[in-house]
Image (cartoon, helix red, strand yellow):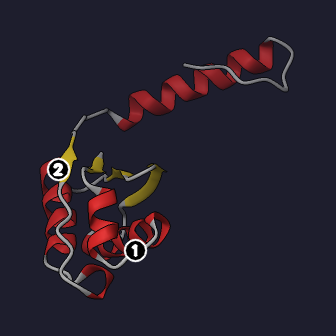
Amino acid sequence: MIAADNQDAACDSAGGMSHNDLIIQCSELVREAMGECDLIAHGGGGQFWVFSGDQTGTEIIQKGMNAIMDSKLGGGDIKLTFSCGIAKADPDELIERAYAAARSAHLDGGHRLQHG
């Protein structure tokens, strides 16, 4: 996860840029830096969730952060910092757990959400 630390200050330094515009520009920069099989999702506020099947978390975070820090975000020289977290999960295990949860929801009568 990549989380912007200082959104308010960054928006103010860009002459009152909206948080939404800042997030859109950041997400576009991170997306361009990622591989074609990677996925980025906005997690709310200044948080981005980044998923990859072919790169390490450190590689993705570094590419995303560098893309934003090397850009002229907001048309100016915005100083945006980030806090990052990395977690590794086995995709096969996640799929098995999701399948088991969906199967349990079905067996419990269907039309329901079950966590795995």
Q: Amino acid at mark 2?
A: Thr
Work out whether residue 76 or residue 60 is closer to the camera in this orientation and state it: 76
- Res 55 → quadrant: bottom left
Q: How many marks?
A: 2
Does residue 73 appear left or right of residue 81 in this picture? right
Q: Residues within 10 Å of mark 2 (few under 14, many from 20)?
A: few
- Residue 58, compared with residue 109, is above or below; it is below
- Residue 109, compared with residue 23, is above or below; it is above
Mark 2: secondary structure = loop
* Place of residue 66 in the rendered image (x, y in percent of width and height, measured from the top left): 13, 69
* Place of residue 89 in the rendered image (x, y in percent of width and height, measured from the top left): 31, 33
Task: Tell me if residue 91 can be seen.
Answer: yes
Work out whether residue 24 or residue 115 is closer to the camera in this orientation and state it: 24
* Place of residue 95 in the rendered image (x, y in percent of width and height, measured from the top left): 49, 33
Q: Amino acid at mark 1?
A: Gly
Which of the two discs, 1 and 2, labels the residue nearer the N terminus?
1
Instruction: Please report contact status of discs 1 and 2: CB closer than 8 Å, yes or no.
Output: no
- Residue 47, compared with residue 16, is above or below; it is above
Q: Quadrant of the C terminus?
A: top right
- How far apart, in angstroms, are the residues tagged by discs 1 and 2? 35 Å
Label annotation for residue 45: none
The residue that disc 1 covers is 16
The residue that disc 2 covers is 56
* Place of residue 36 in the rendered image (x, y in percent of width and height, measured from the top left): 35, 71
Q: Quadrant of the N terminus?
A: top left
Pick out the residue farthest to the bottom: 75
Which residue sits at x=24%, y=50%?
A: 5
Q: Residues within 10 Å of mark 1 (few under 14, many from 20)?
A: few
Work out whether residue 87 or residue 82 is closer to the camera in this orientation and state it: 82
Which residue sits at x=67%, y=20%?
A: 114
Task: Tell me if residue 30 can be seen.
Answer: no
